[in-house]
Image (tube, helix red, strand yellow):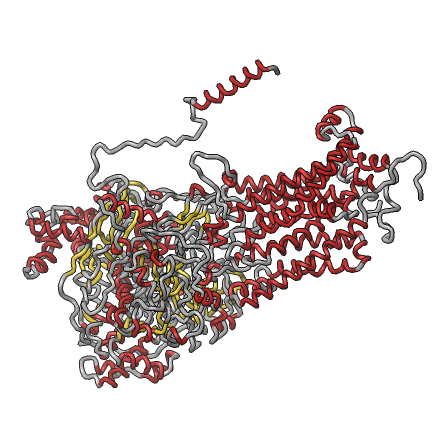
Amino acid sequence: MALVEVIDPNDPGKPNRPQTYQESNRDIIRVLLKPSSMYIAALLLTIAMMGYGGWCWYQQIVWGMGVAGITHPTMWGVYIVTFVFWIGIGHAGTLISAILFLVRSRWRTGVYRASEAMTVFAVMTALLFPVLHLGRCWQAYWFFPYPNQRELWMNFKSPLMWDVFAISTYFTVSSVFFFVGLIPDIAIFRDHSRGLVKQIYGLLSLGWRGTHRQWHAYMAAYGFFAAFAAPLVLSVHSVVSWDFAMAPTAGWHSTIFPPYFVAGAIYSGCAMVISLLMPMSYLFNWHKYVNTWHYENLAKMCLLTSGILTYAYGMEYFVSWYSQNPYEQTIFVWRATLSADYGWAFYLMVFCNCIAPLAWYSKRMRTNPWSLYIIAALVNVGMWMERFNIVVSSLAHNFDPATWWQYVPTWIEVGILVGSAGWFMFWFLLFCKTFPAVAITEIKEMVTPPVKGRLEA
Amino acid sequence: MNRRSFLKALSLGSGATALTGCGIDDNRYYTPVEDLLPYVAHPVQTTPGTPSYFATTVGTGPRAWPVVAIHREGRVVNVGANHLAHAKGPLGEDPRYRYRAQRAVAPTQFFELQRQYSPDRYTQPMSEGASISWEEGLEKLSSAITAARSSGKRVAWLGGYLSGTMPSLLETVTGGDALFWEPLGLENEALASRALLNIDTLPRYNLSKARYILTFGAPFLGDAWGGPGHQADYATARDANDGRFVCRLAAVTSLKDQTSANADDWYPCNPGTEAQVALAIAKIVARKHSYRGPGQELVAKGDPAAAAAASGLTEEQLNTIADAFLAGGALALPGGLAGASVQGTQLAGATYLLNIVARTRDLFTSGGYPGPIHSYQDLESLMRDMASGRVGVLLLGDLDPVHALPNGAEFAEALAKVDLSVTLTSHPNDTTALTKLILPTHSVLEDWGDEEPMQGFHLVRQPGMAPLNDTRSLGDVLLSVWRTLDADNAPTGDWRGYLMSRWASDIFDPQVRGLGATGASPADSVESTESTDGDFLRWWEGVLGEGFFTARGGNAPLSPTGDMQGPSGGGLEGNGELSLVVYPHPFLLDGRYANEPWAQEMPEPMTGHVWDTWVLMHPLTAQRLGVGDNKAVILKTEVGQLTVGVEVSPCVKENVVALPLGGGHTEGKGRYAAGVGLNVTRLLKASKDAFGALAWQQTRCEVTRADADADLISTFGVYPRSYEPGDYTTDESDSDRNFAASVNAAQWAEKGDGETEHPGELTGIHHLPLDARLKAANVTDFYGLPDHPTYRFGMAVDTNACTGCGACAVACYAENNLPVVGKEKVKQGREMSWIRVNRYLKDTPEGHSPAVHFVPMMCQQCGHAPCESVCPVLATYHTIDGLNAMVYNRCVGTRYCSNACPYSARKFNYHSYVWPEPFNLQLNPDVVTRTMGVMEKCSFCVQRLRRIKSAYRDRGFTRPVPDSSLEQLPACADACPSQAITFGNLVDPESGASKLRKSPRHYIPIAELNTFPAVSYLARASFHVEEAKPHHEAEGAHGEGTPDGGAHPTPAPHGADGH
């Protein structure tokens, strides 16, 4: 079994397309069979990662934030970096499912369900971090406007508060959108299962019977949610970028941040879709549904956003020179000094985000599975590094040189980072095994419908 | 489930919940049980929640200074400045100048406070490690003294400097064999005074009137040389108010320590040649003055050419210094420990001569420290007697010869041969751990006593609290020994009575009652204590209330009637290329405060190092050796070697390596000192100068690379420090940032600090052009500033007065319950200090040596605080008084506030810190201790603000608290010996802090961020920067660009509240 089915680039999709409705049903429902040992192993690995992360978090709760590497003045470290990273990952899903749906991009069909799932789980992962980076995480509920007799409110001026609303809105909308899309497919699972499992799928499919009226309502709802979710793609990461841009800290305080962050988020999200779907389609043999046609299109998305990011990086330097702001200049020069504390992170970021994807300008590289996989992985690393550079290096060399300090992450922070990846993968694996991770109904739209007699042509 | 069963389950469930709520057995839940029992009858002077203040004296010998012990619920929780140590101080008021009050608390006085609660304190008498009763202990002591007397052996006291009543009592009990010695280098000055000036006291330096001060290394702006009064005097001299001069400070030293870092001119000089330099300058001055008088032949021995050659200075530089002396108003200070070379006493003598030939009559007078000062020679002969078994009883005071003497090991051996070695002090050290009998005495906060740091400046010490442990007053111990030995003549009263009778006979009678000095010893008059007349008792009560009494006298001009051999040769001996210089650690001093966590955690002012010993090395020297910051090197002298970490610094002369004293204690000193740092005296021999003083600067050393990293940690950040000779701008500590600003000294002296139309016009700070355009459009701020109807508390910090002594930072630890986190945590950048005294190096136009600026940075209490708007839970908000309030309870610990703070003023509680008992007794009950996960920062001592506001309200005043009650209210402003910090109400245009915001020296660091800080700074006077252009000539926004409202040429929209 090849890692990726290579298809004829001149006729994307066609030869390998499932030929009948039954075939596509069968292919997808196959995931419900007894799990392979590889799947079990992967699942156990994610549980172990979560366990380690949980243990690290426990240490942090008992001993205080001191077990992490955060220090004065670098009060945010790996946690916020990873938070922004996962929020960014959470962007591609809605982009692919909503925006590409609205512009009727056909290639989204094979990948949109998985990337939507990725979105929901990535946001779930990201949501861990605002809680676990708190000095007193047991007070996290103070972020919400719950009624209390002291009439305490939150501070609506705080970008962190905007985050709470932006992300919870995004999470709600993308979850609902995700679920709405799942309904007809869950009904297929219901129809092919028995006993308790059938009951559960039955409950989740909300009585879907596939009538014309239901299809009509479904398509209207789907279109509505797509239109509703599309602007959130832009707004959420803009709000996240304001966590930084709204503070006067040199290196953060920049108007370029919202578009820069949104482009970065889409970039990392598309790369993550590639990174996730390649092993998944290998594991579940979905090559008919997810193949180089999709990967190539994702790679093109990455190329576009990589270009935007490279421009943004350059523009940050231009603006710091053009403004003649000494604090900003110092930070940007220092950040790009290879011998400085975080020079390696900067050049790793530039290589992964700006240089490595250039290979995808070549069609061969865009369709070569190894190049796809390796470069997508590099982009993921690069995007994490980008957030590291923004968060850490700006803080470490703040206005007063007498406070400059080096932040070094500890094993606790690394453990929680690993644990968060485990948490994300755990949900994703469970989902792929129990739900239609490829959108059967939309695949069917591309299949010759079962009709009596023969079709013309 | 039907409706009925649902309702049943519901009622059962809610009933159970309600019952749990009123359960009696609530041990499962944490309910703090506290008994709040009111006093039936209040103990005298104890009202719960209300402090009582005791004027007392903390510090001993020349470092003694009047302070106020702040007493709460049975314990002293803090020390504050004695507000009466004012113009009534030792020098009296001078109507010509606005005199800076001499109210101050030095860092070491706070260390004495922490010492009080040290877990390592002796708690009871002990003999050979076993606990005994006081009766047994005194019996042992008395019988040992009797035995020693009968066998003709010495009964000696060895301790640090003491003045006032105690020395005479010690002399009586030991039969005249009391030795007072300290390793901080005053012995040179004492020996020179005796030999040259024929006086028993040290000379007095009247710094406040000096126009030019030349120091040969005496750390007069720190604690290692004298009390904090010098700093107050220096600040007066340095202040150009009323259109005066600005005192220029020059240092001829091999090292810029915290004191000489303040020098305007640093003349790097080879160690050991200072005496020749001083004498050469004296000779030039004498020649130009055509000096005829005593000492002229001594001065004639000076040789400028030879001195220049030996010291590494040029003759031109010597002439420059001499010219300053010829101009008048100049004063030379001796060397302290840094000048204590093999010619240390000659150096002291030469500075005396220089002062005399320069006719600095009213600046250099008699009346300095009058207490007994013995030389190392006396100590050495005692050691010899000890080693040969001729000492029967050695009474050991607060001195640690085993640690502090180069030949400490020999002392330890000799100590073992003493029949009975007795510890008579309150705290352990390396030496007391070796003594046989330990009779712990009261600490300075528990005992009666007196001191006389300058002749005629009598300080009284009264207990601020009851003793914590089973200790006794040293005076009482000595009196009871005396009574045992000589029941007929010994006084019958206690130590307090003895003290009072001494004050009655020696101070009250001659000074107040107008009788001549009786000449009677205190012992003679002690019987009359009980019947002392009411006049004395009334006077005594008054003195206790004020804490001191200033007698007439002193201030006589001095004359070099004695003789003294001149300096010869120069430089240090020994192998190796590099001269080894040792200097007192500004906080640990010679190591006596090494067991005080505050002293260890305070960043050393010049290097920022904590909890360690380092070696300072010039960049070129380091380059030659191929080492850099925090690399280990091996220092080798004739007698020993040490492996120590390097701090590369342009503030030390080339080819000199400098190490601070005070580290490397054994377990005997206590848990916090043991094993911290290195004992650098182990590199030295116990060599003496010609007069018998210990020579600290004595040898060269060989330095080799250890090819390993050291474990030093500096809190001064990690900015690149690539010093190139002649170009210190690569030290990015303040490039282009104007956290530290300068004004031309002459221009400022002419202009004064009065209110000006263009505040900050002398600083030459140009803000970003954006400000200018906004100003032109009369747009000060898009959002309105917060409303401050009555108060906007603010502060003005004078960086010209600040000497970097660190008193403010220590005061903050004491007042605000800041935890000490230890070296490992500091290494992670987690020290909790709310004030950091930033040290910036500024390139000087000459380029030979960077100018050092000290800038205390605390929360700036911004009007538009970035921290406030970003906090998601409103844990920090702007109060109506203009404070950035920090609500610990509400904080969830996002730490966003710290990230947003441009001044990085906030600190985070990474852990819940605990205070080992009994340190917890020192905690200020007015300030909560913080637990892990919350942010904290300077609160402007909000607890003091609340107290004073409540006090005014309770007395029925409706007007705001007046400026006089606010000016020094926060702990930092209260402690600051230079009074660099002025606190006040910015709404009141007449308040001191408001007026200083209109000073031509006014500046606000990173003002262009428009955060409208309540803290403003005053630029440091410099003799090296060019004059600033007048405002109208400067382009763009000049000074005016400091958008703090107070600086507006036209009334700002919110001008009323002091912006």
Q: Position of residue B937 (x, y in %)?
A: 41, 51
In the shown orientation, is residue B250 left or right of residue A394?
Answer: left
Q: How many marks?
A: 0
In the shown orientation, is residue B404 left or right of residue B954?
Answer: right
Q: Is residue A143 above or below residue B702?
A: above
- Of residues B974 and B689, the one drawn nearer to the viewer in this rendering: B974
Residue A228 seen in the figure:
yes
Q: Residue furthest top?
A: B4
Which corner quadrant holds the N terminus of chain B? top right
- Of residues B883 and B116, the one drawn nearer to the viewer in this rendering: B883
- Of residues B134 and A150, the one drawn nearer to the viewer in this rendering: A150
Q: Is residue B719 above or below residue A374?
A: below
Q: Is residue B325 above or below residue B912?
A: below
Q: Position of residue A293 (x, y in %)?
A: 81, 50
- Of residues B608 and A309, the one drawn nearer to the viewer in this rendering: A309
Q: Position of residue B604 (x, y in %)?
A: 40, 60
The residue positioned 40% from the left and 56% from the top of the image is B860
The residue positioned 43% from the left and 61% from the top of the image is B780
